[in-house]
Image: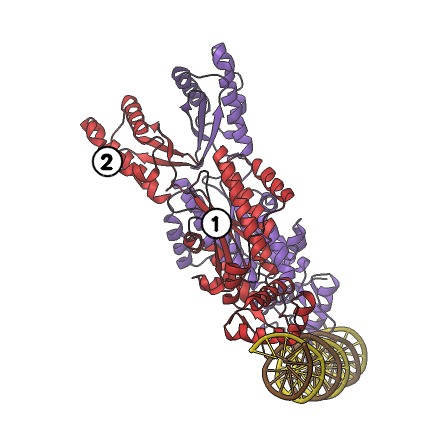
Chain colours: A red, B purple, C brown, D yellow
Amino acid sequence: MLNERRLEVLRAIVHDYVGTEEPVGSKALTERHSLGVSPATVRNDMAALEEEGFIAQPHTSAGRIPTDKGYRLFVDKLAGVKPMAAPERRAIQNFLDGAVDLDDVVARTVRLLAQLTRQVAVVQYPSLTRSTVRHVELLSLAPARLMLVLITDTGRVEQRMIDCPAPFGETSLADLRARLNSRVASRRFADVPQLVQDMTESFDAEDRGTVATVLSTLLETLVEETEERLMIGGTANLTRFGHDFPLTIRPVLEALEEQVVLLKLLGEATDSGMTVRIGHENAHEGLSSTSVVSVGYGSGSEAVAKLGVVGPTRMDYPGTMGAVRAVARYVGQILAES
Amino acid sequence: MLNERRLEVLRAIVHDYVGTEEPVGSKALTERHSLGVSPATVRNDMAALEEEGFIAQPHTSAGRIPTDKGYRLFVDKLAGVKPMAAPERRAIQNFLDGAVDLDDVVARTVRLLAQLTRQVAVVQYPSLTRSTVRHVELLSLAPARLMLVLITDTGRVEQRMIDCPAPFGETSLADLRARLNSRVASRRFADVPQLVQDMTESFDAEDRGTVATVLSTLLETLVEETEERLMIGGTANLTRFGHDFPLTIRPVLEALEEQVVLLKLLGEATDSGMTVRIGHENAHEGLSSTSVVSVGYGSGSEAVAKLGVVGPTRMDYPGTMGAVRAVARYVGQILAES
DNA sequence: ACTGGCACTCGCCCGTGGGGAGTGCCAGGC
DNA sequence: GCCTGGCACTCCCCACGGGCGAGTGCCAGT
């Protein structure tokens, strides 16, 4: 049913529609692409493609536009990832190299992605779940008040205040700090609970309450901080969406403010490789006319977080995917260096 | 020129236009407000108001809409701040009381403001410039690698990595930590530079390099962190802007992404009391059809940061001002408690 | 100083009528 | 059997034009 030429026709339709934003007809197609056949033949192919649900007509006697299913086929079979040009790659690297800390890396990445793709960019902060503990620090702020500081290998720092059930001496503190670090330093995050399990027992009775509190706070931090943070940018690009504005844009803006929604969206992406969710493939209703291109990034071989862009289903998939992949790669490098 | 009734007419025009979003005519005015005069008289008043630049006609033979100057007069002379109703005040307090840390307070405040005013909310993180140092901590992560942690009385925590020019012993570290804290703890941020000025000299020659590095990093942190962070929310409310969408909304979204612009905007607000900037009064061009209502908030008597909302010039000023003031007050309380 | 009346101005809505792009189908040719 | 040119048909888009109504400015009268 779908011979080579028909796929080529679909590709041409997607290409033209993405460019012009207008339904594309058979005549215009043959003029702009050298398909080697006449408009009449293309019309037959179009009828077949419509039959299969890859394209649709907004109304009778209008040109065709791709459906979600059509974009899906395009992305899966017809479109490659367009690599970035060398100057652009250099620009990415230069821009990211200027970052001074983790916040800055994320902020710059968002700006970069938004500019390159001219769409809304979403970047998740490196997750704690996969990272390792670089250092745990305990500070005594007052006789019965401690502060716990957790430093990860991705450069993230978390702190918690702790009110102790009983005063806690400097010696005990130093002791606890040393033992904690020897156990958890450079261990994977997920392993920490098991590693500190029986620590309380080895302390004096009077200190056990405090030690237990410290440990449970530490574990709490692990759990709480698995709730990821993220940063978005480039929302002004939403104005390039279409003509029927308020209706399209409002639910998207609402969805973008729901961090939970976005995190789920990014989370659904497979760990390795790029994920493209098109239109109604996105669980969230407000995003049913958008596509989400996302990919994991990380300092090592493993992905520690995701980043991506949200744009109209009518987007330049090869270009967007190229930009997303390139940015993810360089962010990973930056993180590995620091 | 502007007698009592004419001001009353202006008030009525603003009121109706804010409600209906449509130019208001003389007849409609007399019907909806008991001005005690006939439409013809109102027409004369309107002509006078237009002469003075407080109202304008979109086109001949249409109703009048307020100009920026008209809103200005309205805000300054005609409108009070509408206090929040008791149930709403309780709701605010309950919602903010649920916050677990500073980030959460700010996040909740943004949501609250956006919901209450149905506009875009902007909340600045409590500034470091006015706050005092609660504690400075130094951790040794590696022989020649330190971490500096700064804790402020507003609950904010900043950390910096330091590469030392020479290895730095634990004794020296403890010494530096103790001396630093005794000098700067509970001192105002602005005073710190002077307080640590001559500290280097009292250390052994071999350690001086490191001490100097630590001190300069500390001072750097002060300066850098005077660059404020802020959080925005409720951008979906921009869709309620008007009919001529893309043109109006795009520059606003762009402005909102420029933190610098927003910070300047908030910064211009006077320290005490509420500031309302209307339309072209905003320096930024993209915001020339918006009004910004902002106010300082703080844990004590002094404001440590600002918050506010951005909306169309055609907004409910008394209600918005009431909501902004109420939220600022409760946030201040929450900060004071923690 | 206010009011009622009146002529006038425009924006808005709606129906109408080409013009054009695109389609489906069919008969004919390679 | 597949492709092509031709042809009639369908609709969207847009420009034109008239009627309606809200609103105005002005003026004469109280």
Give the x, y percent position of residue A227.
38, 47
Q: Amino acid at mark 1?
A: Val
The label nearer to you, 1 versus 2, is 1
Local secondary structure at mark 1: strand
In the visual, does A139 lie left or right of A55? left
Quadrant position of residue A7: bottom right
Q: Is residue A253 visible?
A: no
Residue drawn at the location 26% of the way across and 37% of the way down: A194
Quadrant position of residue A221: top left
Quick one: label 1, few (<14), some, or many (20+) residues within 10 Å?
many
Task: Pick whichever, A49 or A235, lies toward us.
Answer: A49
Quick one: label 2, few (<14), some, or many (20+) residues within 10 Å?
few
Q: Is residue A150 visible?
A: yes
Q: Amino acid at mark 2?
A: Gln
In the visual, does B248 lie left or right of B316? right
Give the x, y percent position of residue A297.
47, 44
Q: CA distance from mark 1 to mark 2?
A: 35 Å
Q: Is residue A310 above or below residue A184?
A: below
Q: Which residue is mark 2?
A: A197
**Which chain does tag 2 point to?**
A
Q: Is residue C11 above or below residue A292?
A: below
Q: Which residue is mark 1?
A: A295
Mark 1 and 2 residues: CB-CB less than 8 Å, in contact?
Answer: no
Q: Is residue A59 above or below residue A165?
A: below
Local secondary structure at mark 2: loop
